[in-house]
């Protein structure tokens, strides 16, 4: 399994595609925010993910950022900063 994460340019696929099997014997995953990049790799097996809704993004942020807190909640004094992070990420968890 090969994972190519966050491919931003269609030229990248053209440069590396010969390294992958032309038949379905190999497996690879390309993550991209550009539909045209995804469609170059395969037209039959794409999954389009939407950004998280704000409540889900906040819950995920708190679970990951404050994993060692008993209730995994953001301390009140950090909430404004945490919400600024969420705004910057725009619902994309890895951002």
Image (cartoon, rainbow, N blue to C red):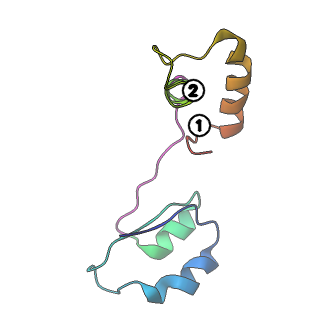
Disc 2 secondary structure class: helix
Q: Do the residues labelled 1 and 2 touch (CB within 8 Å)?
A: yes
Q: Residue 6 is drawn in which quadrant?
A: bottom right
Residue under the image location 59 percent in, 37 percent down: 91
Residue span colored magenta: 44-55
Question: Is-magenta flag for residue 74?
Answer: no
- Residue 84: give x, y in percent of width and height: 73, 27
Q: Is residue 12 left or right of residue 19?
A: right
Disc 1 secondary structure class: loop
Q: Is residue 34 above or below residue 21?
A: above
Q: In this view, does 26 lie to the left or right of 20?
A: left
Residue under circle 2? Answer: 54
Q: Looking at this rendering, what residue extends furthest in the top direction?
A: 76
Residue under the image location 50 percent in, 60 percent down: 31
- Residue 12: give x, y in percent of width and height: 60, 78
Q: Is residue 90 above or below residue 28?
A: above
Residue under circle 1? Answer: 91
- Residue 92: give x, y in percent of width and height: 58, 42
Q: In this view, does 26 lie above or below 78?
A: below
């Amino acid at each position: 399994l090969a994972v190519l994460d966050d491919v931003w340019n269609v030229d990248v696929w053209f440069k590396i595609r010969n390294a992958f099997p032309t038949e379905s014997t190999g497996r690879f995953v390309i993550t991209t925010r550009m539909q045209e990049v995804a469609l170059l790799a395969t037209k039959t097996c794409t999954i389009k993910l939407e950004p998280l809704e704000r409540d889900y993004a906040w819950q995920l942020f708190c679970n990951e950022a404050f994993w060692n807190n008993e209730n995994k909640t953001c301390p009140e004094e950090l909430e404004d900063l945490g919400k600024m992070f969420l705004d910057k990420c725009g619902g994309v968890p890895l951002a």
